[in-house]
Amino acid sequence: MTDIVTLGIDPSLTSTGLSFAGQTISIQPDTRGVQRLVEVRDRIMYTVIHNAVSCVAIEHYSYASRNSQAHSIGELGGVIRVALYEANIPTVEIPPTCRAKFATGKGNAGKPEVVSAISARTGIVWSGGDGSDRCDAWVLEEMLRYKLGLSVLDWPKSHLDALEKVDWSPLEPITKGIGK
């Protein structure tokens, strides 16, 4: 299973975090409107194609958000999901509360708590204005890696409970025949 390449995506209109192949980056488009949607989609798909990504974990929509950008964020999420679907990339949607619980043990943890917990566990420093976006993408990818048996980290059971609330069925084409 070492040939499986995973990707974590934390979608955002201003700073989409990506985590793959041991690195994290953010996409910070200068464009607006439809051009921004196309730019983010194209950069994600470039990453998918050029890194031979096998499967993706993307943060699910936050239904509790009270942001006037909700429709635009929904459009971005839809554009990303359609592109991944058209490329036949299995995609798992992870609720924000599951991401937070996996990282911290608490489902209601905020971004600063997630960054702090992951830094303490891994020693990775999440600096810059995009640090929390890259960290969130890393957590999403780590959840995927753990589920696939690819993680090298030990996680407490209280954190692993977050995995139980995720629909992992999109991974079935990858996991068939490997005993997972």
Image (tube, helix red, strand yellow):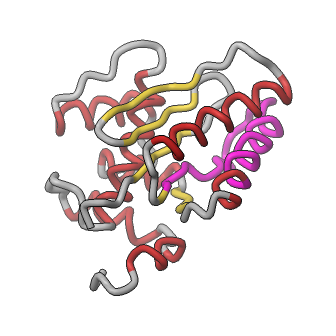
Q: At which x and y percent is residue 161?
A: 33, 66
Q: Is residue 174 magenta?
A: no
Residue 79, compared with residue 123, is above or below; it is below
Q: At which x and y percent is residue 91?
A: 55, 61
Residue 132 versus residue 27: which sits nearer the camera?
A: 27
Q: Is residue 79 left or right of residue 89?
A: right
What is the magenta range? 56-82
Residue at 41% over, 13% down: 128
Residue 17, compared with residue 81, is above or below; it is above
Q: Quadrant of the C terminus?
A: bottom left
Residue 103 versus residue 41: which sits nearer the camera?
A: 41
Q: Is residue 17 left or right of residue 120?
A: right
Q: Quadrant location of residue 74?
A: top right
Q: At which x and y percent is residue 101?
A: 37, 52
Q: At which x and y percent is residue 90?
A: 54, 65
Q: Quadrant location of residue 119?
A: top left
Residue at 18% over, 36% down: 122
Residue 62 versus residue 31: which sits nearer the camera?
A: 31
Residue 5 versus residue 18: which sits nearer the camera?
A: 5
Q: Is residue 28 left or right of residue 143?
A: right
Q: Quadrant of the N terminus?
A: bottom left
